[in-house]
Image: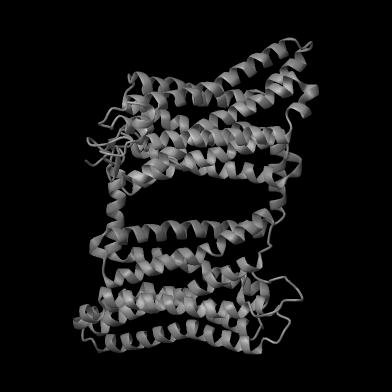
Amino acid sequence: MTFLQTFGNNSGLIHPPGFYVVGFKIPYANFYIIFLAFVYVVTVIFNVLVIYVISVNQVLHTPQFMAVCNLAVIDLILNTSIIPGVLKASFLNDNFVPFGLCLVQMFFYYAFLPLESYALAVLAYDRLIAICFPLHQHMLNNLPIISVLVGLTWSYCITISAFSTSIMTRLSFCNSVKVFSYFCDYAPVFRLACNDYSLHWSLSSTFSLVNLLCPITIIIISYSSIIVAIAKMKTAKSQWKALTTCFEHFILVAMFYIPIIVIFMIGLYVRAIDHDQRVLSLSLASCMPPCLNPIIYSLKTQAIKKRCLALLKKVKKFASINIYFIFLSFVYIISVLFNVLLIYVIASSHSLHSAKYVAICNLAVIDVVLNSCTIPGMIKSFLVKDNFVAFDLCLVQMFTYYAFLSLESFALAILAYDRLIAICFPLRQHSINTLRSMSCVVAVTWSYSIGMTLFATLIMSRLSFCNSVQVFSYFCDYAPVFRLACNDNTLHWSLASILSMTIIIGPFVFIMLSYSSILVTVFRMKSVGSRVKALTTCVEHLILVVVFYVPVLTIFMIGFYLGLIDPDQRVLCLSLSSCIPPCLNPIIYSFKTKEIKLRALALFRHVTVTPAGPTAKQ
């Protein structure tokens, strides 16, 4: 059978819905996974810092630092292609990977793993030219040449990885669907094929050898030439100075290639290495270099270190603001983590698929979006010192913020409605407050809020702004932007005011009426125990209503219409009223609900008790 016939025949191919990734079958696997989570966080923070420092400083726009920046970008993508999946499989106990997603993960990993080695080869070339050809350095190693080298390595690795991954689609998988690795690893998946894959395996092996041996050959030749050049230097000081510029790079090369060559090559071709040892070594070889690269290499480079220190000194000048932004960052992380956990617990537990928990899940989704539309932009403007927002993006942010701010108030009103039905009409609760009726109420509030906010935002696009372009707020706030208009905006202002009254005051009035009815019903109850039991189910919701509405009603409404509040006070109060409730909602309300707390604790116990990571299912 010819090559084209082998790859052109589509008949008889069997592709499963997906694979079950076995994961780590080592002692104390959960502790190792927590370690990988820490490694991933460090990788993201330090590599993003390196990319930012190099990008914003013109003096670092040189061939060497372009190569360093290239390595940092590759490190980010390489770790992101595997570690989040490992964490998801472990903490959510879901190790099933759909077939298409498996191929995508395989493509990214095997595109950026060789790119990591080629990036180290490019850095070796940089050292070779700097030490062996110092007088011709700017001619042989300039920005266009490095750009071409980086572009070629990316094009080559992505093309080869795409071709290798496409080979996988020409195989049939009719036996086991257990992948003995921590992700959709090429060799373990390949061995699950039940048809003849000799030609496919030979091609893949050839690509692997080329991608692995070609960069290391370049590195070895470069360092051989560097050693010869250093040996010819006359003074020991010159020799030492030249060697010190190579230490960091040499450490990274050893750290990357030793486990790859020993484990990957022997395990892939000889198959003599235990699966657990291969998985552990490959995970360390894939995850540790991206974490240590910016620390060992980039941040030890004098020019980058100076720029980082200058950035820190610049930040220290705004210490109090810095603390507040750190606080908001912490609030944002807590908000996202707890609300996402809450959404997952409700979505994955069929016993929680009731009207009440649809309302709670609705609130959690709104909280995540509300915080995400303002805090990341605020932190970005502070860290990058770039507070310019394009007009269209300003309108998008304005729309998202006021749509989900109003949705937050409607979500609290829906939860008040849930308490009203449960306490005032307990016998008819399951007929009035059904899953279908709650879904309809949620859908109506979303449609109304989005429709009204869209109309209010469109009003803004009908105004002219010919004076100042300074918005005295922490985001594209409606009222401060409105006041910058230089044409007659009386009609627009009246319409916007009516809409604001409807979406803020309307839900608040409904909540007050609901609690008035609840209080009347509670005081009609005969026993004190029944009264206390009924009221305790409302305490968490009342706390959230107070936290949300007190600053909104006092600052937002007065500041919006009368303009009597100091801009700084308005910004501070609005930021707190917008950011704190989404953080507190899952803690104060949802996780104090007995059913959700039990489910969350059961999930936590399952994660901590399982000794060997995610279990594979047949």
Is residue 182 visible in the rendered structure shown here?
no
Q: Nearer the viewer, residue 340 or 72?
A: 72
Is residue 103 visible in the rendered structure shown here?
yes
In this rendering, position of residue 252 left or right of residue 203:
right
Image spot of residue 468 (x, y percent): 75, 73
Image spot of residue 577 (x, y percent): 53, 71
Could you tell me which residue is drawn at 53 percent across and 41 percent down?
Answer: 76
Q: Residue at the right extreme?
A: 135
Does residue 347 lie above or below 540 as drawn?
above
Image spot of residue 293 (x, y percent): 57, 33
Q: Which quarter of the picture shows residue 374? A: bottom right
Could you tell me which residue is drawn at 23 percent across and 42 percent down?
Answer: 617
Could you tell me which residue is drawn at 72 percent across and 51 percent down?
Answer: 314
Quadrant location of the N terminus in the rendered image: top left
Does residue 537 lie above or below 199 as drawn?
below
Quadrant location of the C terminus in the rendered image: top left
